[in-house]
């Protein structure tokens, strides 16, 4: 039996209808932007394995840091104890985070980073004796699959089985071009009509919605409205963090500061699951009290796992090398050159580029569903041609590891262009 066949006996995959899905592809090895399956077929990982892997697969520098940490101190509980990797990581992160972010809380994945931020927003007002229980989020947002993160997410596909069981969330349209005023007005209305505690958003790029983008100025305006109404703002940079948008964080473009940030995905260079929620001192101070009931009673067994911290430290070091910064610029230039050509194609409706993120929307009659037939046809075509891309409905996006070569990028662009001929 092949690995793909053996998989089916016991394994249950994410976002998968096992009755209709094709057998999963068994990957045996990865190096740089490439992956090889059990038949030695080669694939270019054009989406950095769900956006986690900027520095390439099986990265030796990160692997060495992990090995060193594993053979020094693999783990210790973080309640009542601490360790150098967490301390150094907090110091390094504070150097590069927006200037008001001063406290670091660890968890295990993007959803839990969001869960922590939402719980903190709600408890912040509880601790102050103020009744504020509603969270504001964008339409078509994606913030993860745990309950509060799901509640904040606007993609009904993921959440429909649980409607009616969520914390209170109200929605506003994202301030995409031409729709900014509608977004500002909706925010003001929601604030007027609800006891809003926090506003959570994916800054500049709504990833799972199909890399839908908005301008920094529009987001700055929304944050300013929240600040004027004492509503806590949460920048979910789980996808956008660590260089994807061309700057270290998407918030670096925005000019106003968020109260909290959520980080995961590229944090450890795609090696070890880990996440961080960051806070201002104002937020921390609302929990800092003689009264134990005002503490944040949230934690995970593997909080601040030293091996994860070592992987994150090595990843940060890689991100800040001149070579990696050059890669960010190089990938962006390639994307822009491809955009200039492909946007003229008669099957292309819109294109967008920010940093290392490229997306194009294919013209369709009517709405293309998230996992619909067009999407599946495209996905199969890409896989057949040795390129891993996961279109979202009629949107094809590319978000490669930063170390991808020019010729690998060229191959991806070619396959995307060929795909336009089969739709
Ligand atoms: C992926 C993602 C999450 C969820 O992260 P997980 O690690 O999958 O739980 C949350 N927010 C954003 C913006 C994401 O892209």
Image (spheres, helix red, strand yellow):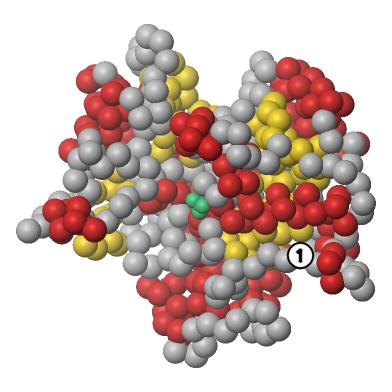
Note whether residue 176 is visible.
yes
Note whether residue 396 is visible.
no
Q: Is residue 411 above or below residue 156?
A: below
**In this image, 23 relative to 186: left or right?**
left
Q: Is residue 80 above or below residue 134?
A: below
The residue depicted at 26 percent of the width and 18 percent of the height is 423
Residue 420 location in percent, x, y? Answer: 29, 21
Q: Quadrant of residue 306?
A: bottom right
Between 115 and 400, the residue placed more toward the observer is 115
Between 180 and 112, the residue placed more toward the observer is 112
Residue 167 location in percent, x, y? Answer: 68, 41
For the N terminus, the image quarter is bottom left
Q: How many marks?
A: 1
* Residue farthest along the bottom direction in this orientation: 72
The residue depicted at 15 percent of the width and 58 percent of the height is 6
**In this image, 210 relative to 277: left or right?**
left
Label 1 residue SS: loop
The residue depicted at 56 percent of the width and 33 percent of the height is 163
Between 171 and 384, the residue placed more toward the observer is 171
Residue highlighted by disc 1: 296
**In this image, 181 relative to 132: left or right?**
left
Residue 373 location in percent, x, y? Answer: 28, 23
* Residue farthest along the left direction in this orientation: 1
Between 156 and 204, the residue placed more toward the observer is 156
The residue depicted at 49 percent of the width and 84 percent of the height is 74
Categorize mark 1 by other alpha carbons within 10 Å: few (<14), some (14-19), many (20+). Answer: some
């Amino acid at each position: 039996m092949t690995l793909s066949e053996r998989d089916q006996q016991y394994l249950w995959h994410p976002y998968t209808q096992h009755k209709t899905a094709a057998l999963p592809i068994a990957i045996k090895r990865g190096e740089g932007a490439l992956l090889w399956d059990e038949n030695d077929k080669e694939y270019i990982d054009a989406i950095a394995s769900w956006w986690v892997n900027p520095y390439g697969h099986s990265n030796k520098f990160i692997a060495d840091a992990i090995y060193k940490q594993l053979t020094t101190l693999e783990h210790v509980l973080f309640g009542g104890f601490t360790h150098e990797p967490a301390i150094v990581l907090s110091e390094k992160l504070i150097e590069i985070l927006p200037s008001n972010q001063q406290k670091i809380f660890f968890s295990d994945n993007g959803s839990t980073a969001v869960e922590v931020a939402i719980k903190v927003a709600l408890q912040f007002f509880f601790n102050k004796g103020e009744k504020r229980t509603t969270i504001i989020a964008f339409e078509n947002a994606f913030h993860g699959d745990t309950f509060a993160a799901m509640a904040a997410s606007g993609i009904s596909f993921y959440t429909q089985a649980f409607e009616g069981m969520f914390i209170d969330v109200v929605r506003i349209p994202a301030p995409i071009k031409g729709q900014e005023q509608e977004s500002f007005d909706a925010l003001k209305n929601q604030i007027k009509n609800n006891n809003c505690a926090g506003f959570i958003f994916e800054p500049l790029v709504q990833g799972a919605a199909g890399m839908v983008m908005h301008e920094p100025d529009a987001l700055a305006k929304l944050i300013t409205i929240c600040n004027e109404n004492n509503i806590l703002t949460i920048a979910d940079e789980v996808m956008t963090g660590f260089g994807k948008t061309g700057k270290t964080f998407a918030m670096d473009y925005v000019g106003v500061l968020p109260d909290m940030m959520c980080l995961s995905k590229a944090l450890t260079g795609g090696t070890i699951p880990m996440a961080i929620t960051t806070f201002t001192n104002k937020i921390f101070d609302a929990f800092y009290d003689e009264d134990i009931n005002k503490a944040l009673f949230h934690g995970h067994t593997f909080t601040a796992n030293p091996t994860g911290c070592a992987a994150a430290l090595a990843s940060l070091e890689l991100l800040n090398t001149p070579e990696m910064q050059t890669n960010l610029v190089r990938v962006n230039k390639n994307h822009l050159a491809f955009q200039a050509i492909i946007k003229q194609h008669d099957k292309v409706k819109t294109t967008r580029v920010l940093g290392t993120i490229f997306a194009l929307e294919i013209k369709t009659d009517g709405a293309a569903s998230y996992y619909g037939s067009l999407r599946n046809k495209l996905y199969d075509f890409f896989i057949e041609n040795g390129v891993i891309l996961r279109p979202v409905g009629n949107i094809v996006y590319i978000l490669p590891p930063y170390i991808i070569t020019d010729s690998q990028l060229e191959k991806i662009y070619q396959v995307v262009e060929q795909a336009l001929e089969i739709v």
